[in-house]
Amino acid sequence: MVQDDSAQGQARVAAAASGDQQAHLPPGEVTRLGASYSPGSILFTLLCTLGITLGLINTFGIRLAGEVMLEGQYYWLFIGLFLAAAFIAIPARAGSRKISVLDMGAAAIALGVSVWFATNAWNMVFFGWSNFPAGIVIWLLMLELARRSGGPAFFLVVLLLGLYPLVADRMPGLLMGIPYDFNSMIEAHVFRPEGLMGITTKIVAQIVLGFLVFAGVLIATGAGEFFIDLANAGFGRFRGGPAKVAVVASAFFGSLSGSVFSNIAGTGTITIQTMKRGGYPPHYAAAIEACASMGGVVMPPVMGAIAFVMAITIGVPYSTVLLAAILPSALFYFGLLLQVDAFAARRGLEGRKERGEPIGPILKRGWPFLFVLGFLIWGLLVMRWEYYTPWYASALMLGLAVFNKKTRPTPARLFHTARQIGVLVTQTAAIILPIAFVVSGLTITGVTGSLTSGLVALGGDNLYLVIALGMIACFIMGLAGLAIIAYIFLAVTLAPAIIQLGGLNEVAVHFFIVYYAMLSAITPPVGAAAFLAATIANAKPMRTAWTAMRLGIVIYFVPLFFLFQPALVLQGDLLPLVHVLPSIIIGIALISAGFERHLIGVGDVRTIWRLPLVAVGFVLSFPGLWTTLAGGSLAVFLVAMVWRDNRPPRVTGKHGKPVESPA
């Protein structure tokens, strides 16, 4: 099943139906491609298709006119094509549907200057060639892209940190760095590996591109619908079935799309309404979708762009990051499902009463998706084809689509598939490419080293204080709603400080930063993901955000656990998992019971036991022998108290002998 409109377009339709078309829609989404075959849509798709074709040529080293493209040549062509596509697809003003002359002019200039730079790639390599006026043009266009893709907050981050080299020598203390004049700064930002010719462009144009193509192919061929049907067949008949379907479907769909907002818009328009019909209040349904969609971004096997950034930053294979994400994401969704189940039990929300579609026919028509996902995992983990696997998987998916008449390639379906892929790549590039100026500003001034030592000094060589400061920094940096910005900044400042001071596992530290940087998506006062879901559900945004924060409580403390027990991210000695993992699972069950007032298998929880259950669950979950023993003892007592409260009252007959309760 090929969608004719973008996922974000579905969100706008839902928002319009609620009478609040522009409320809380995140910036940076492709929202104005118009009709399927409008001139703007056709031009956008052509630009993206050419960019993706160049990416395929670059990945497999295919020769053009007998020569292999230089990396710089490819980077500039990629930047030009997707910068132009972004100006066509992402409106300068929220809600604008018309592509203006200024948009087309910006797209043409971006493409023209970038192609000119590509023709001078050899000179850049051998002679350090640069052009100051043209460099300013690219810098200004990237700043406008940052404003369109991330909104005012993101624009200010890119602008101010990008200009930081101009005043680095005037900053106080640990913020002092090496100064640059404006000309040298532009040269570093635009032409040097510290800037656009470095890590950020490599992430989008080489590492992430194949996975975005794969995600676009899956979505365009109906993977989202299949996973919703599969989740419904597996969970729809249980109590709270609609909510459990939403959690499972959003976990899979989020892993494929890599975008929390596209995930909410793509599955939320279906699952939120289903949950509301099943008895869930609008704010609760929206909160469930927001939490499930957020977790999908770090859900293997595809995950979001942050996973690839992390792999490059740490210098480990992507498979290492993929494996490390398994247990944290599983624990998060376990806690979310427990809370959903507890709410349904307390409210008496039963599952689907009518006979649903059997799982057999669903698997029969959707087996290609599972087969291709299995191939992807095999290629990544066993064959270690990190750059090539998603391209192979995409070709395999398109080949299997031939055998299904609903997805069999036709010119129209191929066009919509190419456009879907273009949407994903353009939205990702629009966020990541401007970060080059942030990375460059921090790198060329040498301020990252002083910030690291400063954090250690500020914490007084106290590891726990440094971690607490880091948690605050992660949340503040993530307030813009762009976790990847927070991660890149903190990966070069906070991570070395924690590793240096505590000798902690590097992969665990970087995952700690990623998880805490993500929290702003559901945490007030920003909560962009919760606000978007609230718009679809016609619910109060702030109430939805507070509910999402409660439902997603596991993600607030699990990062602390794998920080001190790297076995939870499958690093180091895995033997501690034998006792650590069961204690965390039980601890999460107790915490969920305290928040949702129902302990699975036991019954409803009185108010007096709620806070003790949460506290004991946290103590039991913390990886340590003494905390496990102490928490376990208290947990037995609390569970016994809850069981006693739910035990049927004894009815006595003559002579005080107990008889069966009428209940």
Image (spheres, helix red, strand yellow):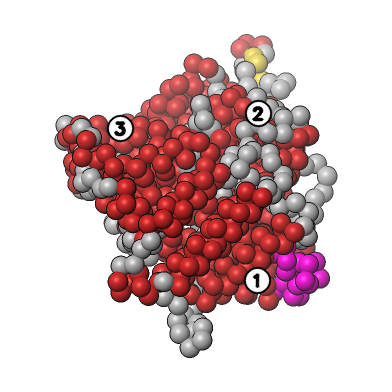
Q: Which quadrant does the C terminus fall into?
A: top right
Residue drawn at x 50%, y 38% as measured from the top left: 481
Distance of label 3 from label 1 (alpha carbons) = 45 Å
Asked if the stretch drawn in magenta spans residue 467, the answer is: no
Asked if residue 372 can be seen in this view, the reply is no
* Residue at the disc numbered 3: 468
**Pointer 3 or 1: first along the chain:** 1
Asked if the stretch drawn in magenta spans residue 408, the answer is: yes
Residue drawn at x 45%, y 43% as measured from the top left: 483
* Residue at the disc numbered 2: 283
Label 2: few (<14), some (14–19) or many (≥20) C-alpha neighbours in 10 Å = many
Residue 263 x/y as whole percent: 62, 47
Quadrant in which residue 612 is drawn: top left
Q: Nearer the viewer, residue 113 or 522?
A: 113
Residue 155, relative to residue 540: is it above or below? Answer: below
**Pointer 1 or 2: first along the chain:** 2
Disc 3 is placed on an element classified as helix
The type of residue carrying mark 2 is His
Q: Which residues are magenta?
A: 400-417
Residue 34 x/y as whole percent: 75, 51
Label 1: few (<14), some (14–19) or many (≥20) C-alpha neighbours in 10 Å = many
- Locate residue 654 relative to residue 613 in the image: left or right: right
Asked if residue 264 can be seen in this view, the reply is yes
Residue 590 x/y as whole percent: 47, 32
The type of residue carrying mark 1 is Met
Circle 3/circle 1 CB separation < 8 Å: no
* Residue at the disc numbered 1: 397
- Locate residue 389 relative to residue 515 in the image: left or right: right
